[in-house]
């Protein structure tokens, strides 16, 4: 008998709870027709040079790094070169040539592994053949490099 009364009371409380309306305020968000949403995807390409040797201030062999196919609206978001400088190398300029012909140099001293980041190419089209070389400021410099070009589209 107590179970029936208890069950009846629980049922009435549940019905009362469900019948009470709870007002919840939410902020209204309105999008105007001229609002735009930008979504960017990212990708990259990379390539390695062979051994770059520069003697007596002459530029080394140019090594090509190809972008392959890139989306039509792609823009460079960063260029990084990991450079391995051979022991005994004189300081040198690392030369990076963009497919549009512009060249940026970075002065490198010391030996071992170096990481060089260029932001001068940001917001340019990554498509085409990039070129990498070195130019010694001493007698001889030797290095290899791996270039990564990040881009958004």
Image: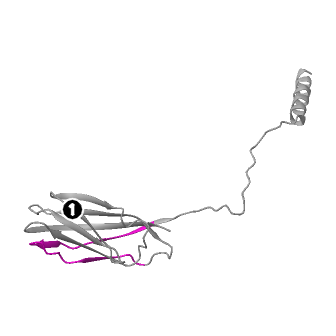
Towards the viewer: 93 or 26: 93
Query: Percent position (x, y) of residue 141?
Result: 12, 67
Outermost residue on the top side: it is: 2
Towards the viewer: 50 or 125: 125
Query: Percent position (x, y) of residue 115?
Result: 27, 58
Q: Quadrant of residue 78?
A: bottom left
Query: Percent position (x, y) of residue 48?
Result: 27, 71
Q: Quadrant of the N terminus?
A: top right
Towards the viewer: 121 or 81: 121
Q: Which residue range is magenta in the image?
A: 43-68
Query: Percent position (x, y) of residue 10?
Result: 87, 28
Q: Which residue is mark 1?
A: 107
Mark 1 falls on what kind of element? strand
**Left or right of 23 on screen, residue 29:** left
Q: Tag 1: Cα neighbours inside 10 Å, few (<14), some, or many (≥20)?
A: some
Residue at point 51% right, 73% down?
A: 73
Q: Is residue 74 above or below residue 7?
A: below
Residue at point 15% right, 58% down?
A: 111
**Left or right of 79 on screen, residue 145:** left
Q: Is residue 60 above or below residue 93?
A: below
Q: How many marks?
A: 1
Q: Is residue 46 magenta?
A: yes
């Amino acid at each position: 008998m107590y179970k029936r009364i208890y069950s009846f009371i629980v049922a009435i409380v549940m019905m009362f709870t469900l019948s009470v309306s709870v007002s919840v305020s939410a902020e209204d968000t309105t999008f105007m027709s001229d609002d735009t949403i930008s979504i960017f995807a990212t990708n990259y390409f990379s390539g390695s040079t062979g051994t770059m040797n520069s003697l007596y201030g002459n530029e080394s062999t140019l090594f090509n790094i190809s972008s392959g196919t890139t989306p039509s609206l792609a823009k460079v978001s960063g260029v990084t070169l990991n450079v391995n400088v051979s022991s005994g190398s004189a300081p040198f300029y690392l030369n990076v040539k963009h497919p549009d012909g512009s060249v940026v140099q970075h002065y490198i001293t010391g030996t071992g592994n170096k990481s060089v980041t260029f932001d001068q190419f940001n917001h340019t089209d990554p498509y085409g053949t990039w070129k990498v070389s070195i130019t010694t400021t001493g007698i001889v410099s030797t290095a290899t490099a791996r270039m990564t070009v990040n881009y958004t589209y």
